[in-house]
Amino acid sequence: MKLRRTNGVFLCGLTLLAVLIGCGSEARSGLIITATITPTYNGANTPSVDVVQQALCPSGDPEYFATHGALVVFNVRRKDPKSTMPESITIDGYTTLYTPATDSPSAPAIQQDTRDETIFIPSLTGSGATEVEASVALLDLVRKSAYSAAAGGALNNYNALFTFSGHSQYGAEITVQARTNFEIGSFDNCPAN
């Protein structure tokens, strides 16, 4: 584990399945925050991002077509398990940076996404840990449309780096990052008969 100080904020970097761990701030928040991202679409966990909507499914209904979401899970625990000092975290927003995977070097660029969405992580009770889940956007309809215009339904692979920014109830700046991979192209999301 590496500990580095950047602009008054301490960050821990532990790469484990491409998850980065944020360690609080110089204000000694006393919390360790990790985040994981799982791509989701139409109620299922799937990294397959569909950019081409079929006019009609065999059932006669249009194919489901919406923003491809993701589930973020924040895990918060205390650096010092003996501490019982209350401290909540507010995530004020996030930025998603998309880069083509090494096996897709000629994939078109996807514009970075920045969103102001609040996610509240309540204070821990006692010396325990807590998990908070929230739904976020992996790839919205604007970016799906831009990809489709540039590449049609061609299959490419991308990495998405989510950077969540916020603050503790004591004003310490918090930054937590998490990565996920996804494939993008034309996928059949019609319901099975």
Image (cartoon, rainbow, N blue to C red):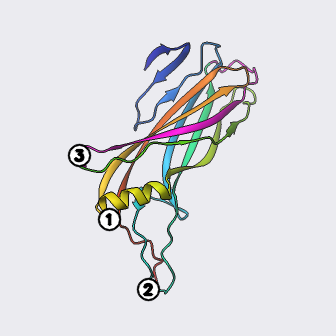
The tag on residue 153 is 1
The residue to which callout 3 is attached is 105
Residue 105 is a magenta residue: no
Q: How many marks?
A: 3
Image marks 1 and 2: residues in contact by CB distance under 8 Å: no
Above or below residue 76? Residue 160 is: below
| Residue 84 falls left or right of residue 110 | right
Image marks 1 and 3: residues in contact by CB distance under 8 Å: no
Which residue is pictured at 35% across the width and 55% down the height?
183
Q: Is residue 48 visible?
A: no
Q: Is residue 146 visible?
A: yes
Provide residue 152's location: percent of width, then percent of height: 31, 64
Tell me where the magenta segment starts and ends, as one range: 80-104
Q: Quadrant of the N terminus?
A: top left
The residue to which callout 2 is attached is 58
Q: Which of the two residues, 179 or 68, is positioned nearer the viewer here?
A: 68
Above or below residue 135? Residue 125 is: above
Above or below residue 40? Residue 118 is: above
